[in-house]
Amino acid sequence: MHMLNSADEIRERIKRIRHNVLEAKAKYRQPSDNVEIMAVTKTVPAELVNIAIEEGITLLGENKVQEYLSKKDLYNQNSSVDIIGHLQTNKVKYVIDSVEIIQSVDSLKLAQEINKRAKTIDKVQKILIEVNIGNEESKTGIRSDELENLLKSVALLENIRVKGLMSIPPSVNSEEFLFKMNNLYIDISEKKLDNIDMSILSMGMSGDYDVAIKHGSNLVRIGSAIFGKRNYL
Ligand SMILES: *Cc1c(COP(=O)(O)O)cnc(C)c1O
């Protein structure tokens, strides 16, 4: 066995993930389906994130506002950032001018704040609605039976555009919940709600991205399988 330095390791892991994604797509999906790979950057130093960007993974996922703000100016410019962690309303103002999609919207209150802040900078902010598909107490996200009502309210906000759904399924029996999530996504898409554009289904992480692709995901959020085990301080 030979040792790789972390930059080479990251490059190797990305190659492997791309290969697995292609394989899952070939097995389960239509040739025209696109599946985007996001690099989840929590706890990862900017210089290592930049290795992933150089490898062509240009979509980054950020959990914590403070960590994001401390690293964003160090990222290779050729990248875009989505917020994927729980976002407090009082932090919206710090990220609104620099993020592509806020994936973790789970309340009307948060959507209203995003709308207000987006309006002040003349932006239409793209968002996903985060669904707590397992109805887990410990997790954020709207319950699936409340999704349609939330979508109808958010659709009225002029400076927001809903682009789809995001979910973190329970770790036990995750396939069952990925399947449920895809059905929910399809049901909502077929309702063709005014002003709601269902084009992104964001689910699948390091441990289950292939299964998520099987169940319709078109955006997989991958952290440890790219950067290795996280070191929380
Ligand atoms: C950390 C995180 C991921 C990535 O998790 P890994 O298991 O390291 O791939 C994906 N989505 C969200 C919302 C996360 O917080």
Image (cartoon, rainbow, N blue to C red):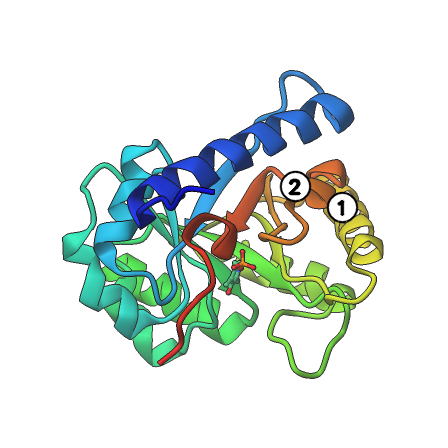
Relative to 49, say whether 119 is above or below.
Answer: below
Q: Quadrant of residue 144?
A: bottom right
Question: Which numbered circle lies on residue 59?
Answer: none
Q: Amino acid at mark 1?
A: Asn
Q: Residue at (62%, 17%) from the top-left corner?
A: 32
Residue 37 in the image, given as x and y percentages of width and height: 49, 39
Circles 1 and 2: CB atoms closer than 8 Å = yes
Q: Nearer the viewer, mark 1 or mark 2?
A: 2
Secondary structure at numbered mark 1: helix
Please rate how many residues cluster around mark 2, counting C-alpha atoms within 10 Å: few if below 14, some from 14 to 19, many from 20: many
Three-letter amino acid code of the residue under disc 2: Ser
> Residue 80 at what x, y percent from top left?
31, 44
Q: Is residue 61 above or below residue 50?
A: below
> At x 63% / y 24%, what residue is drawn?
33
Disc on res. 217: 2
Q: Quickly name the residue at label 1.
A: 182
